[in-house]
Image (cartoon, rainbow, N blue to C red):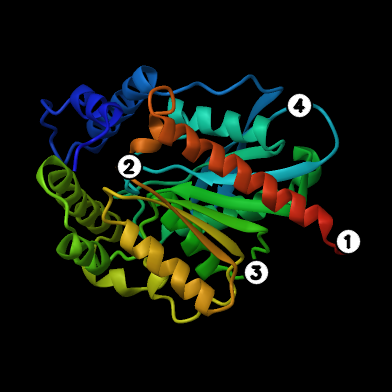
Amino acid sequence: MNLDPAIMAHLEAMDLTVTLDPHDIPARREFLRHEIDRIFTLFGTPGPPVEAIRDHTVAVDGGEMLLRTYHPSPGPPRPVHVLAHGGGWTTGSVDELVCDAAARHRAVRANCVVALIEYRLAPEYRFPTAVYDVIAAVRWVRDHAAELGVDAQVMTLGGASAGANLSAAAVVGDPDLDLAALVLEVPVLDLTGESARAAGTESRLEGLAATIFDDAVEVVGQASLEYLGDARLGVAPLASPLLAPDLSGFPETFVLTAELDPLHREGARFVERLQASDVPAHLTHYAGAMHGSPILTATWPTARRWQDDIVAILNGVHRRAYDRPRRAG
């Protein structure tokens, strides 16, 4: 297949010349943070102004973590969207420009407070630490709803890539989170790697598209192992939500996948399993997109549609929540 010119420009702009010591975790994180910010500056759209950005300290088992909230404007309590960044469980930060932009866009255009989670990273904090960090963040937001100015009865949780994995795993780990919806972008849902490998076997892509696809299979496998520490843990439902025996306790779930990403197979399968469990679940698949294509909001119409689709999802969830009778208390 022929790649869109915007995708080609993204690929050509990536710095593939740097060789990093795999054991120098701080250097790798610093390089990737700089690289993602550079790519976003070239191809992304900054978010609109918000009324306030506030940092909070959340106590977690064995330490603490940062939670950063974006408040669109003064007013009555409004819905809250809790968001976990990507980065393969080992990198990524709420300080990335792409995270800031996503939070601003969703806060303003969906009229909600957005809370970014700085969950702890592997290999210093391996599986399942980050899962319980996400659970702690959701519960902290609920417990501090009044001071945050949020309506705890209308809370959504989401993330991209590893952040999507952690968001789904949080529901597996604590079915009582009482979420209005999950929003999972290019989610990693099977850490055994079986789904990604099967997607590679089934792929009919050729040329550069096939190379991108195959490279993604390898990257996901390496990141999963670094997060788990022991590949045998990949079968645990808390690591691989797709493998959870019972998904009936999930809230309404929205899954967004990319054609050139091997994770699209497990995303689609997850939606099928949710629907079979009578959970409202929805799949949106973006033709021609790579795993990182949503960053291209300034140059690629499909990335802008992806961004708009998430805003529409949140607005729809909020509208339906307020149309239903309210719980007491």
Tell me the quarter of the image containing the N terminus. top left
Number of the front mark, 4 or 1: 4
Q: Residues within 10 Å of mark 2 (few under 14, many from 20)?
A: many
In the displayed structure, would residue 125 be above or below residue 109?
below
Disc 1 on helix, strand or loop? Answer: loop
On the image, which quarter does residue 279 sit in?
bottom right
The residue at which mark 3 appears reads as 176
Residue kind at label 1, given as amino acid type:
Gly
Quarter of the image for the C terminus: give it: bottom right
**Residue type pointed to by label 2:** Ala
**Mark 3 / mark 1, whichever is N-terminal:** 3
Q: Residues within 10 Å of mark 4 (few under 14, many from 20)?
A: some
Q: Is residue 153 visible?
A: no
Amino acid type indicated by mark 3: Asp
Nearer the observer: mark 4 or 3; the answer is 4
Q: CA distance from mark 4 to mark 2?
A: 33 Å
Question: Mark 2 and mark 3: span between their CA atoms?
Answer: 34 Å
Residue at the disc numbered 4:
73
Q: Choose the circle earlier in sequence order: 2 or 3.
A: 3
N-terminal of the pair, mark 2 or mark 1, is 2
Front of the two marks 4 and 2: 2
* Mark 4–mark 2 CB contact (< 8 Å): no
Q: Earlier in the sequence, mark 4 or mark 2?
A: 4
Horizontal side, residue 24 vs residue 276: left or right = left
Looking at the image, tell me whether mark 4 or mark 1 is earlier in sequence order.
Answer: 4
Question: In the displayed structure, does residue 108 sit left or right of residue 321?
Answer: left
Residue type at mark 4? Ser
Query: Where 313 falls versus 294 (above or below)?
Result: below
Which residue is found at the position 32% from the left and 23% from the top? 39
Q: Position of residue 260 (x, y in %)?
A: 26, 48
Label of residue 329 in the image: 1
Residue 215 is marked as none
